[in-house]
Image (spheres, rainbow, N blue to C red):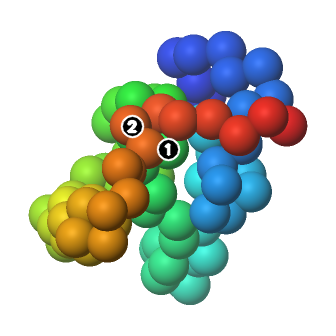
Amino acid sequence: MLTLTNDSGAKCSTCGRPLNNPYRRLVDGRIAEGCIDNAHTGHLTPTTNTSAWHDRKSAKAFRAASKRSLRALGIKPLPAGHVVAG
């Protein structure tokens, strides 16, 4: 997969994959499941299947609900593109 950024080994804290290459499971050539963690936001190549899947309305709604849940627990959500030292 191509990337627009140099992530220099940064990884998602959810799937453990590089920020520009999130976990995806394909079924018959289509994405069936994968990581939609906010860490990947801004690191995916636009106009690709993986970017479109990450930007689905339901994925965005899930990320927003996750942020609300964290805030309700008094936890400050990490910003888009946060990194975990690789």
Q: Secondary structure at mark 1?
A: helix
> Seen in the image, is 29 located left or right of residue 86?
left
**Residue 73 visible at all:** yes
Image quarter (top left, top right, bottom left or bottom right) of the N terminus: top right
Residue type, numbered disc 1: Ala
Q: Circle 1 sits on which residue?
A: 39
Residue type, numbered disc 2: Ala
User: Residue at the spot x=36%, y=50% of the render?
Assistant: 76
Above or below, 19 against 33 in this view is above
> Seen in the image, is 62 located left or right of residue 6?
left
Q: Circle 2 sits on which residue?
A: 80
For disc 1, the neighbor class at 10 Å (few under 14, some 14 to 19, many from 20) is: many
**Residue 49 visible at all:** no
User: Residue at the spot x=61%, y=28% of the render?
Assistant: 2
Above or below, 64 against 31 in this view is above
> Seen in the image, is 35 located left or right of residue 78?
right
Determine the CA span between mark 1 and mark 2: 5 Å
Find residue 77 and report its horizontal and vertical position in percent: 37, 50
